Image: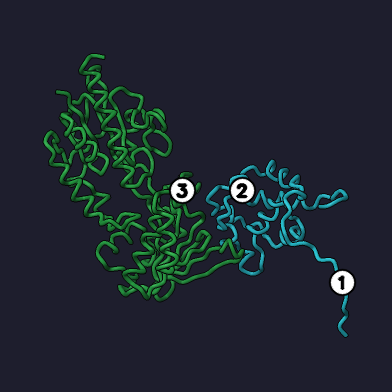
């Protein structure tokens, strides 16, 4: 029986593993952490339908128990090499594993907001990231730097995305809609708190996203300002004063807020960058490069080596899961063709 | 005494059919990075001159882009070329070069005819 190794137990890795296992393939799922779905654990709700992330976690965790999946958690695969007839995987403890095909699903990490020093993350307590905000929403406690209920929460788009200064020219795709989602969540949990979003363009690309934006305006009174915040400074009472230009008014804008939420973009994870380099399939910004984004978007150009999910580019959870299913099909077709000697 | 009468009023709409963008295109050749501007306003938000005057570099370079050159030369004198805008621009536009080149183009003697 042919064996497939999947690297990374996020939504993409688990979904692909379960599809392959249900189709009679033996899968080993490697994950460098001790637990699966690390990034998803931080999420409260998913856009645009506010489905609890826990439901996705429960469903995927259930799929992990599919017959034919062997979980290898706490194993950090650092290199993958073709040995003429099979793939050999090397972990950080110099153990090796073999497989007939390998699917890379090593995912993303969020942009480190410390790198945008002018925005004050790590300097002023009132400056947080969208990830910090998501955790607060998840635990039902949105608090300012003094531990009180905030009166005003302000979101800033494109932190570490569409920014030449941080080396990321690309749009991270999910932050626009995430800010709208979080602003709605702030207004739901704290009806007395104002919520503002500073944007340059609002990219509501998915089904139901534009409707969510309308809901944020109509039902929740979220304030949208077109401008990019250039600087943030702390005030004596632990609030944050920000400076921007209101580009629609053509006027400079100053505003004091309790929380400034930096919508941090998605970058290739360390594991993605490392494997991309080791296998010579690293593309722009350290994401995995595929053969053709329209036609062969799970193939890497190396026989038996595939990629799925956010290791390729920023994606939503639902897009990652769909991509994993298409990757599973590509892997299955590959091992079937090898088996029949074609 | 109030004088009554008629006067011609300039239209306040942009007429892209009649506007000549020749000087703007020349500016792009001199500072090609300006092609990348996406109007975020970071330049004017951080501008030092903006703190003391009503100078808005974003409004100035957008007017230039649209071929609306009236009054820009005077506006651009407010800039001290400190370069903070260049430091913060997320699209890597070389704003100091842009400002110097706008000044030079606007200082050229104009041929007769509109603009």
Please tell me the numbered disc located at residue B6.
1
State left or right for residue B64 relative to residue A65: right
Mark 1 or 2: the one toward you: 1
Q: Chain of mark 1?
A: B
Q: Could you tell me which secondary element the residue under label 3 belongs to? A: helix
Q: Residues within 10 Å of mark 1 (few under 14, many from 20)?
A: few
Please tell me the numbered disc located at residue A199.
none
Query: Which of the 4 image quadrants contains residue A54?
Result: bottom left
Q: Chain of mark 2?
A: B
Q: Residues within 10 Å of mark 2 (few under 14, many from 20)?
A: some
In this view, the residue farthest toward the bottom is B1
Q: Quadrant of the N terminus of chain A?
A: top left
x and y, in percent, of residue A194 in the image: 41, 71
x and y, in percent, of residue A46 in the image: 31, 54
Query: Which of the 4 image quadrants contains residue A121?
Result: bottom left
- Residue A288 in view of the camera: yes
Mark 3 or 1: the one toward you: 1
Q: Nearer the viewer, residue A213 or B108?
A: A213
Spatial CA distance of label 2 from label 3 is 16 Å
State left or right for residue A331 relative to residue A62: right
Quick one: label 1 or label 2, which is nearer the N terminus?
Answer: 1
Q: Could you tell me which secondary element the residue under label 1 belongs to? A: loop
Say which colour chain A has: green
State left or right for residue A101 relative to residue B65: left
Q: Which residue is mark 3?
A: A166
Spatial CA distance of label 1 from label 2 is 46 Å
Residue at 36% from the left image edge and 44% from the top image edge: A315
Q: Which residue is mark 2?
A: B94
State left or right for residue A157 relative to residue A143: right
């Amino acid at each position: 029986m042919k064996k497939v190794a999947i690297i990374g137990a996020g939504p993409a890795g688990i979904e692909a593993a379960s599809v392959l296992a249900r189709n009679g393939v033996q899968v080993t799922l490697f994950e460098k952490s001790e637990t699966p779905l690390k990034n998803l654990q931080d999420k409260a709700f998913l856009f645009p339908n506010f489905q609890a992330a826990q439901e996705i976690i429960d469903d995927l965790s259930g799929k992990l128990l599919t017959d034919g999946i062997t979980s290898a958690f706490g194993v950090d695969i650092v290199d993958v090499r073709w040995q003429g007839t099979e793939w050999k995987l090397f972990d950080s403890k110099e153990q090796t594993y073999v497989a007939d095909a390998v699917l890379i699903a090593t995912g993303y990490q969020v942009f480190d907001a410390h790198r945008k020093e002018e925005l004050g993350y790590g300097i002023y307590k009132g400056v947080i990231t969208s990830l910090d905000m998501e955790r607060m929403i998840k635990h039902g406690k949105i608090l300012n730097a003094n531990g009180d209920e905030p009166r005003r929460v302000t979101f800033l788009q494109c932190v570490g995305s569409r920014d030449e200064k941080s080396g990321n020219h690309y749009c991270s795709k999910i932050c626009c809609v995430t800010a709208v989602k979080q602003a709605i969540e702030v207004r739901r949990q704290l009806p007395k708190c104002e919520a503002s979003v500073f944007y340059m363009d609002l990219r509501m690309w998915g089904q139901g996203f534009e409707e969510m934006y309308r809901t944020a305006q109509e039902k929740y009174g979220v304030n949208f300002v077109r401008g990019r915040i250039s600087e943030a400074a702390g005030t004596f009472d632990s609030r944050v004063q920000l400076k921007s230009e209101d580009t629609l008014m053509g006027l400079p804008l100053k505003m004091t807020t309790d929380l400034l939420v930096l919508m941090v973009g998605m970058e290739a994870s360390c594991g993605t960058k490392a494997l991309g380099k080791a296998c010579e399939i690293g593309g722009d910004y350290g994401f995995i490069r595929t053969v053709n984004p329209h036609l062969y978007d799970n193939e890497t150009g190396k026989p038996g080596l595939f990629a799925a999910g956010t290791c390729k580019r920023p994606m939503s959870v639902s897009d990652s899961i769909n991509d994993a299913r298409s990757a599973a099909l590509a892997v299955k077709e590959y091992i079937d063709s090898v088996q029949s000697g074609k | 005494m109030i004088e009554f009468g008629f006067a011609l009023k300039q239209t306040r709409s942009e007429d892209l059919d009649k506007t000549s963008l020749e000087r703007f295109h020349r500016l792009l050749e001199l500072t090609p990075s300006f092609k990348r501007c996406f109007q975020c306003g970071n330049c004017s938000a951080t501008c030092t001159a903006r703190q003391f005057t009503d100078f808005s570099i974003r409004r100035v370079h957008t007017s230039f882009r649209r071929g609306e050159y009236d009054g820009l030369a005077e506006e651009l004198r407010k800039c001290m070329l400190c370069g903070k805008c260049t430091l913060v621009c997320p699209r890597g536009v070389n704003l100091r070069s842009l400002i110097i080149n706008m000044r030079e183009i606007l200082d050229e003697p104009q041929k007769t005819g509109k603009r």
